[in-house]
Image: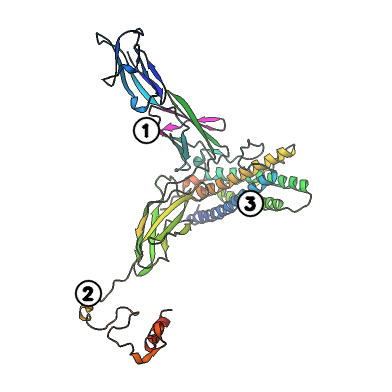
Amino acid sequence: DSHVQYERVGADVTMKCGSMDWDAAVTWTANGTDIDESHLNGSYLILKNVDLMQSGQYSCYEGSSWHLKYQTYLRVGTPPKEPVLMCRSNNYPKGFYCSWHLPTPTYIPNTFNISVIHGTKEMVCEKDAVPKNRCHIRYLQLFSTVKYKVTLTVTNPLGKNFTTLTFDEFAIVKPDPPESVVAKPVPNNPRRLEVSWQNPSSWPDPESFPLKFFLRYRPLILDQWQHVELSDGTSHTITDAYAGKEYIIQVAAKDNDIGTWSDWSVAVHATPWTEEPKHLTTEAQITETTSASTSSFMAPPTTKICDKGAMVGSGAVAVCWTAGLVVAAYSVLFI
Amino acid sequence: MAGADGASAALQRRDLCARGIRLAGKMRSDVVDLLEAYAERQGLDASASVAAVEGVPAAAVERWDEQTGTQRLLENLAAYRAFRALLAQMLEEHREQLGEADTALGRALAAVLLQVSAFAYHLEELLRLESRGTPGQEEEEEEEDGPPPQPHGLFEQKLRGLGVLRELAQWAVRSARDLRQLAKPSPAASSAPGPAESP
């Protein structure tokens, strides 16, 4: 006969060959491969300190006839650790969902059981088909000060464990991030970016349960974020962007009155409008040999700045006073 | 009803609702601060579960989304009238315990009581607007059910005070939601038959 046997990692396992006597001559196989006699005590198979790799099908055959006398599927695993449970309402005021997982795998099948109690009332958490480790509940009451108590129990053939979460109706409200975030430059405005977004589609009634938003933005070259909180509307114009710099922008949402901020939206990138340089392709070819300067900071190369007779000072800090005047004039212009 | 009257009433309602929502928001913020100060002063845990206290209107409601506008206003009004009496009692108890010493907590209690009274009055105005054309409603008169039941011991008083403030904070959130529903231009928002639908 064939069945499944669950054992803990590190355990010592003794397998009997069905109803065969201890001193019967038998052969054991693991996944079709003969097991060495050193693992046998009479007809018993002894596996010490089993590990995960030893999971598999074990079969026992009578010595001479090779009749299959016993077969078992050994599954090595661990009892469950305390599960991790999270409950959240991203569709307030319709309801909330709870999801869970184990911090470490058990390597054997687990069963999860969830109970939700509100005051004295037991509520049913309907399991989602996908993902499997999630269930949802419809609110029967709103604005209740009575806490919800959710208990998740996980059981497998080697043991069980549980965790409990207690919370207020308001505390678990956390919308999904805003959707369709778009950032665009504003024509003829080198320091502006227009950002718009939409309410998360999972939020059922933004008119009665309006969301407020938090926008953050920074140029890629800097680490520091700028923040703006917006109590209504789904758009905002950034007016202090650095000209010509690419920006990264994100938005988060929160119910106007209760709960916590959503995660940040997907980041969008945008660069403010910049003026196209006008004379680049035509005059540059004509003026390439002349002294027309492209930068105000540079003196025209063919202009003689000064001659030795006009030097002021001595040694390393000798300064041509004409050059000094020129530099001083440009400095004043750009302060 | 003439179209102009209906439009004017709708505008008035929206305006009163908008103001009411702002009042409720401010009230909630002050009640939350008061709740924390009260709990600390009384040596209680602000987040501890408190069993439903007799005479304190619970904000919890089933099928909230199915309520009519008038139902919302009536329930809100009944609640805030009850809170007015409860807060007045708390203030009285506070003064009895501390004599005439004008403490910050006492002042905060008085301020919230004032806001609750103002909000109740605001709701009465909204109800008058909603009930226009339906005379003889008993909500136009003050409902006096008598003073709220008196808690016996000091500890009972403290727990009750916590319960009162916690439910009031919850009501302030509910009221803002109720007023937003009321402000919606929908025929279901009011129990009174509205004017012919305009495009």
At x 73%, y 53%, the residue is B103
Front disc: 3 or 1: 1
Where, quadrant-wise, is the C terminus of chain A in this rendering?
bottom left
Can you give x and y, in whole percent of width and height, for residue B25 in the image? 57, 52
Q: Which residue is mark 1?
A: A129
Of residues A42 and B67, the one nearer the viewer is A42
Q: Which residue is mark 2?
A: A281
Query: Marks 3 and 1: same chain?
Result: no
Disc 2 crowd rating (10 Å Cα; few below 14, some 14-19, many 20+) is: few
Alpha carbon separation for disc pair 3 and 1? 50 Å
Q: Is A132 in the magenta?
A: yes
Q: Amino acid at mark 3?
A: Tyr
Front disc: 2 or 1: 2
Say which label, 2 or 1, has the lower sequence index.
1
Q: Give the magenta-colored segment's residue range.
A: A104-133
Residue projecting furthest to the right: B99
Q: Is residue B192 left or right of residue B50?
A: left
Can you give x and y, in whole percent of width and height, for residue A32 in the image? 26, 20
Secondary structure, mark 3, is: helix
Q: Which residue is mark 3?
A: B121
Q: Is residue B139 above or below residue A99?
A: below
Q: Amino acid at mark 2?
A: Thr
Asked if residue B125 shows in the view, the reply is: no
Disc 3 crowd rating (10 Å Cα; few below 14, some 14-19, many 20+) is: some
Can you give x and y, in whole percent of width and height, for residue A253 in the image? 45, 51
Q: Amino acid at mark 1?
A: Ala
Secondary structure, mark 1, is: loop
